[in-house]
Image: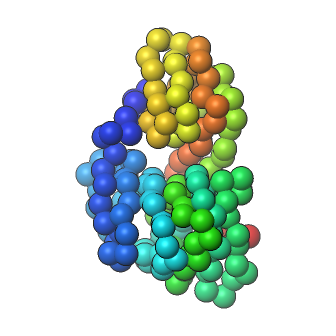
Amino acid sequence: MRVLLADSHVRMPWKNGGGETTEVAIAPAGASLEDFAWRISMAKVPNSASFSTFAGVDRTLAVLDGEMIVHVENSADVRMCARSKPYSFPGDVPTRATVLKPVVDLNIMTRRGVCSVNLTWIGNCGRFEAARETLLLLQSDATLETGQTAGRDDVLWLASGERVAFSTAPASLWAVEIGAEARSRPPRPQ
């Protein structure tokens, strides 16, 4: 298991220059925005804005804080808040967010035909076993069974089959499971 501390996440401008994102992890190591297999980031979205477009990439989005309406061209609008289910849509279709309350989002991008993702919110997690490569984004402080402490926005990166147990469980976390399964079509907005 690798631990990625929130202080080590990389801050950079959005691809379209409209804001700032915090890159949590990217694969393969050293990949750029043009050649990643998958990428996990968090962004502050204080105002309504257009999403950056990424050719051949699918996105899965969750709202950590705030509220917005996501407008994907030729699809029904989706209202999202911290209690909403993740929303998947093609990253190469024009998309805009109307911000109702300033948002912090969790954005997972996967290269179409290369990787897939399953994003799940988990409350009060005492232990977790990874069925496949999984990154756990903590949403509160926790203490691992080993005695190591972790805080909000720290990430525990588990390989397939690895386990983590908590002596003080996080109140909530997001489990980002990455798979190598190819998709024949991009996801359809729900």
> Which residue sits at x=30%, y=40%?
8
Q: Residue furthest top?
A: 146
Q: Is 83 displayed left or right of 136 in the figure?
A: right
- In the rendered view, would you say 28 is above or below 61? above
Q: Residue furthest bottom?
A: 74
> Which residue sits at x=54%, y=24%?
142
Image location (x, y in percent) of residue 108: 51, 57
Image location (x, y in percent) of residue 6: 38, 39
Q: Is 22 displayed left or right of 66 in the figure?
A: left
**Count of marks, rendered view:** 0
The N terminus lies in quadrant: top left
Q: Is 74 displayed left or right of 166 in the figure?
A: right
> Which residue sits at x=45%, y=60%?
44
Image location (x, y in percent) of residue 173: 60, 38
> Which residue sits at x=58%, y=72%?
99
Q: Which quarter of the picture shows residue 190?
A: bottom right
What colour scheme does the image use? Answer: rainbow
- In the rendered view, would you say 137 is above or below 32? above
Q: Nearer the viewer, residue 57 or 185?
A: 57
User: Is residue 49 visible in this depiction of the protein?
Assistant: yes
User: Is residue 186 visible in this depiction of the protein?
Assistant: no
Image location (x, y in percent) of residue 87: 65, 63
Q: Residue furthest left?
A: 30
- In the rendered view, would you say 127 is above or below 155? above
